[in-house]
Image: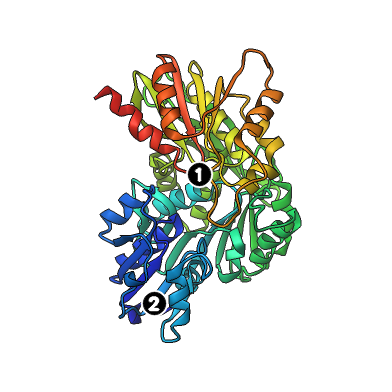
Amino acid sequence: MDLSKINKVYMIGIKGVGMTMLAQFLASKKVKVVGSDVREKFMTDNVLKKSRIQVIEGFDLGNIPKDMDLVIYSTAYSKDTNQEVREVKRDSKLKVLTFAKALSQVFNNFYGIAVCGSHGKTTTTAWLGYIMRQSGLEPNVMVGAKVDQFQGSSLIGESSYLLIEADEYQNKLQNFNPKIVVLNNIEYDHHDFFKTREDYISVFAEFIKKIPVKGFLVANYDDPVVREIARECQGRVIFYSIDNSQADLIAHNIKLGDPKIAGEAGKQFFKVKIRQEKNQGDIGTFSIGLSGRHNIYNSLAVIAICLELNIELKDIRTHLEAFLGTERRMQFLGSFNKVPIIDDYAHHPTEIQATLTGVKNKFPDKRIITVFHPHTYSRTLALLKEFGQSFSKSDEVVILDIYGSAREKQGGVHSQDLVDKIKENSKDKVSFKVSYIPNLAECEEYLRKNVSEGDLVLLMGAGDVFRIGENLPLANC
């Protein structure tokens, strides 16, 4: 896609996180962007508003401008489910692309860096983009979440670098031709599209094959699936690990900051050594403000690429620590009656466990009340057992109704099934409290009446559970 020849773009389903990051990127490149979506409020509404991108709420044939150079639509919709998609596909004069194809056409014209994997894509992409910018590399960056330090979900730079969060769902990866890839981890997900675990893994394997000989892969050595398929890479492979001397970049001596020491509270400290053939050289101590062992892994991937891009070590160390994270990743929303409210996007059992561990480490004296909003029926059904085992670090759990996908039929599993599984796996089956509360309003009312000082409320899920946190702190006003 030659952006110099694109003046006006219409985007159907513009509120999706991927569509929003692309819309903001195009708008910053002086493209006139208009989009449509449902009237329901999304976490992306504010990003679009601040970017002065016009959003028409409600789908209608009358929405579609007549002078568009390009129409981009989210694959959450199709010609069978959306009248606007149906109409633009009928018009042979219009250039129409799916989100993935439009993003890839932009990406493939840059020196592309893609961050992929089952977990940690958003944080790793934003973190790397932040350090690249602060170090003067002038990158272009697209992230699937709002990043306060970006004032949106995109960064615009003068360099040829384009760094993106690359989503594997619906095999979107097949459209991209990267020069550098980060592969954090692989764990079977998106069961509505990938019918088998092997189908899911093969998407990453085929993507890695695309890395050119002069490119490189940064990969998690501690993930056995990643380690296996890394063999498919034609370029160099740089492995990172925690405490495994076989990797190229190794984090060790991990410590939590001492809350009694000024500037250490809430931080993690670790040393990093580099394996060069059979020799290991220590490059010093790093600190990060993000909680959880998973963020040690994310930061190692970031450090590895920064070193390859010849960013000075002192700059990596400084900016790594200064990164504040992204929206909906262990994000502090405020307090209600002195009870902290934290919001997190975790929607897979592994992510839930990682987030809960991070919260527990950061707030060891708090009683954690987790409100979980299951995302999609297919994932909930396929991983019901694993979900049931993932809340052990909570002191109380509230399960909301399943937040269904626009792409799937409802049914096959109910939130009460998840409640039963959690109870079945709890250590204290008698006193451990697990509740089913169907909707956000009822859950908000429950929390208003039942939380007290010493508690912490953790809102979790890929749906709109964060709305509870938007309302609860208002009680203190």
Check the picture and name the quadrant holding the C terminus: top left
**Residue shown at 40% from the left, 33% from the top:** 468
Nearest the viewer among 156 and 239 is 156
Residue indicated by mark 1: 462
Residue 416 lies in what quarter of the image? top right
Q: Is residue 242 left or right of residue 14?
A: right
Q: Residues within 10 Å of mark 2 (few under 14, many from 20)?
A: some
**Residue shown at 52% from the left, 37% from the top:** 373
Q: Residues within 10 Å of mark 1 (few under 14, many from 20)?
A: some
- In the drawing, what numbered circle is on residue 446? none
Compared with residue 230, is residue 70 higher up or lower down, i.e. above or below? Answer: below
Q: Amino acid at mark 1?
A: Ala
Position in image of residue 116 (x %, y %):
57, 56
How far is mark 1 from mark 2, CA to CA? 30 Å
Q: Amino acid at mark 2?
A: Leu
Residues at badges 1 and 2 in contact (C-beta under 8 Å)? no
Residue indicated by mark 2: 70
Residue 417 lies in what quarter of the image? top right
